Image (spheres, coloured by chain):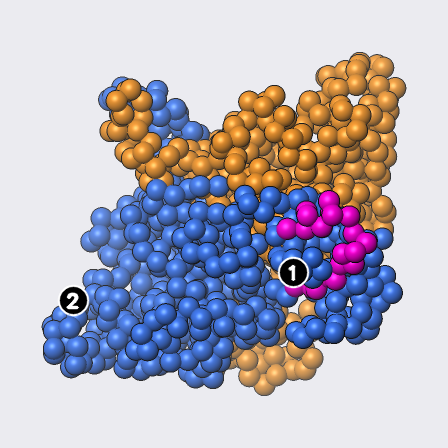
Chain colours: A blue, B orange
Amino acid sequence: MRHTKVKDLLNSTTTLAEVNTKGWVRTFRNNQFIALNDGSTINNIQCVVDFENTPDETLKKITTGAAISVTGSLVESKGAGQKYEIKVSELEILGDSDAEKFPMQPKKHSLEFLRENAHLRVRTNAFGAIMRVRSVLSFAVHSYFQQKGFVYVNTPIITGADAEGAGEMFQVTSLPLDNLPKNEDGNIDYKKDFFGKHTNLTVSGQLEGETFAMALGQIYTFGPTFRAENSNTSRHLAEFWMIEPEVAFNDLNDNMDLAEDFIRYVIKYALDHCADDLKFLESRLLEEEKSKPQAERSEMTLLEKLNFVLENNFKRISYTEAIDILRNSTPNKKKKFQYSIDEWGADLQSEHERYLVEKHFKCPVILFDYPAKIKAFYMRLNEDGKTVRAMDILFPGIGEIVGGSQREERFEVLVEKMKALGISEEELWWYLDTRRFGSAVHSGFGLGFERLVLFVTGMTNIRDVIPFPRTPMNAEF
Amino acid sequence: MRHTKVKDLLNSTTTLAEVNTKGWVRTFRNNQFIALNDGSTINNIQCVVDFENTPDETLKKITTGAAISVTGSLVESKGAGQKYEIKVSELEILGDSDAEKFPMQPKKHSLEFLRENAHLRVRTNAFGAIMRVRSVLSFAVHSYFQQKGFVYVNTPIITGADAEGAGEMFQVTSLPLDNLPKNEDGNIDYKKDFFGKHTNLTVSGQLEGETFAMALGQIYTFGPTFRAENSNTSRHLAEFWMIEPEVAFNDLNDNMDLAEDFIRYVIKYALDHCADDLKFLESRLLEEEKSKPQAERSEMTLLEKLNFVLENNFKRISYTEAIDILRNSTPNKKKKFQYSIDEWGADLQSEHERYLVEKHFKCPVILFDYPAKIKAFYMRLNEDGKTVRAMDILFPGIGEIVGGSQREERFEVLVEKMKALGISEEELWWYLDTRRFGSAVHSGFGLGFERLVLFVTGMTNIRDVIPFPRTPMNAEF
């Protein structure tokens, strides 16, 4: 007979005379009670074995991690905690699991140990929940944009453009490194490389995305991006997934409205579709924080925090207002900031962002109109000649989750800016074409997907919300 | 006032006293009729200008490619071909477009010319339609799997594994190629590379996907994959998007059922959601085929072909049966095949696949149970000891669109196979763990997304169904 998923059995509205299900043993108690999980839900189904009529040889193989097939009747459970259980009539060991060797023992493992076993950690409650929430959030992203008529665009991963300017790049090559071809000048002959030129992994699909927005109106990307930066922090990955919408005719206010509406939608979607997983992750977080001093514990539980974002508008303030607040803040006056804020024009550090979000406003904050000098070349210059129409969205515990801007749509202003920064007009001829032919006001932003998953799952290290993290010195699996 | 999208105006159920819309001029006739497009639909809205009361300076700037904002009333159109048009009261040029310089003239351009202008070709009817269909197909992929409870998994793009075995790989490095660090032996010191080892771009997420399927039950990937192969054909890209579902407890028959059901769902979804775009692409194809001799034209129109796939089961035959058919086929007997089919065990070439699909069966074909020798190490060995539980799905005009298999779940058999092929057990320790701990029957397949888009759009060159194609000697943009 066809097997039924554990989730469907647990959601059954009636007892059933005969069912079959397959999954992995989480625990086996008293030679009688199997907690069986198949990944369809965080919840296990209890399978009650008739141990007196089951061969010892089989019982011995019902160990944590073993794959089994169970046939029996779905009956009301006498035990607490579940409505139904399976009264087992037939049990088959599909694949055993040596209890002494299986790394995922039914006990608490350190997150570091689990990272080293990224191929198996997904068999734990926490990582099963995280990966299901991640998947549902991905779908929420697509659902939001598709409903609104945005076109999903796969911008290139391998890029010939060096000028994206968002960070250090990885080189991509098919040349043999131990026997590099040289040209007459003695330099590496990239004409012999696969693409006939020097190529890198993309750091952003924005520039290509803009060319599509200027034809299709509303587009979004959602794909991997890369940074070859030696940042060994809990907030950075060398390979991460980014969402980049770009909308023709949107100004910066429209852009902020879009970002806020989008973030609320995906969080609401997760709350609606991942209730069991989020409840588990909430209790996990409470448990984890018990070991922390009271002052460092979260003021809100995970679900309270997610609902808070749904119910409260993000605070929008200009960079200039933020500098005033920071300059007059207690930590600045008492010299508690590592980088003290003295002048307009200073780049904000993580400590300043956290102060604004976590201490001053106690809610997500959108900062806008940054000094031109600390932002990218493509951002629209304001009439004041010194600020640009940039915006960053800052989240409690996460820091920057969104960075965006209204783009400079004026050809001459853009070219002048590129010249001043030494960015090659020849290399970006195609980008400039969007301003040569039918240019218009447009805006967009980038959202680091893993930071969103961090926020929604309540995890604290970004390596724990992506299946196989890529960080300095680590590309295992 | 807030602007309204062209699609929404054309779908209006009533005339409207005042509307504003923004978009790009496709054509301007008689100093009076603007065909305006904003990418929300393939259809233009006609905007009727009161040229007697519009300054010459403005009229001159209403050229193909210009971005404009139009305010006026939505009235019933007297002309043929549209229900509504805008009677313009106010017109603003947002960004002009020099009629002599704008590359996308209102005339037929060669596909090759359009490829060189991939950043602008999306402003044409055909490429607007293709990119919208591609986007809708992407969403159909996610919708199908999410509805069925599959978990979306982002397998790594940068991989330390050399053994995926699906093709030539690109190297990823942060080492300075003009000053490579060497170790004591004089070899390149990869310990100094970003990840502390030699890394490549992934050719498949299958192996990592399997580890997740053995925990979450049903998973799928949908992300970019790479081949550093010098294949300058109309069917190959160096960078393409692949969909790879993997399902625990599925055997090869379940796998074939899943693939067939999945393909039908996404094609149906496109038919339901892209009617206007597909109608246009159908007429484009008819037009294109007019220049071909009768014998080379398609027997069915695009929509007939798509509906045929919905309404007819794929023909399933074993490799052995296929060899019999091919051996006895007229082209084989008349030595018309470049590679004649003499013996069981021969690898099938494109010409053989096309014969089976396009001449013999005239429908999609699933071939299964291939000789072990011509297939990958991870495919399950049949009891006959010489064939494996592999399957390929072949489509008319496209060739192989899906390749999949039931995986070898038996630890000893898998290890023996790896040894015979010289695949390092140490490197794939984590993959082998899935067979060490709770192994079970499981299956999956890979579908090249661009080949699906080719089939659905009726295009013939794969470079025309991805925004910015990456091929040998070409990584522009």
Which chain letter matches label 1? Answer: A
| Residue B210 image position (x, y, % from top left) | 61, 44
**Could you say which quadrant of the image residue B277 lies in?**
bottom right
Q: Respond whether the residues carrying marks 1 and 2 are from the same subunit.
A: yes
Which chain letter matches label 2? Answer: A
Please check the rendered image and state whether residue A97 is part of the magenta-colored stretch, yes or no.
Answer: no
Magenta part of the protein: which range? A44-63
Q: Determine the residue positioned at 82% across, 42% down.
A: B314
Q: Residues within 10 Å of mark 2 (few under 14, many from 20)?
A: few
Amino acid bearing label 1 = Arg
| Residue A124 image position (x, y, % from top left) | 55, 57
The relative height of residue A135 versus residue A117 in the rendered view (above or below) is below
| Residue A282 image position (x, y, % from top left) | 49, 72
Q: Tag 1, which secondary structure? A: strand
Please check the rendered image and state whether residue A53 is part of the magenta-colored stretch, yes or no.
Answer: yes
Disc with the residue nearer the chain's start (1 vs 2): 1
Q: Is residue B226 visible?
A: no
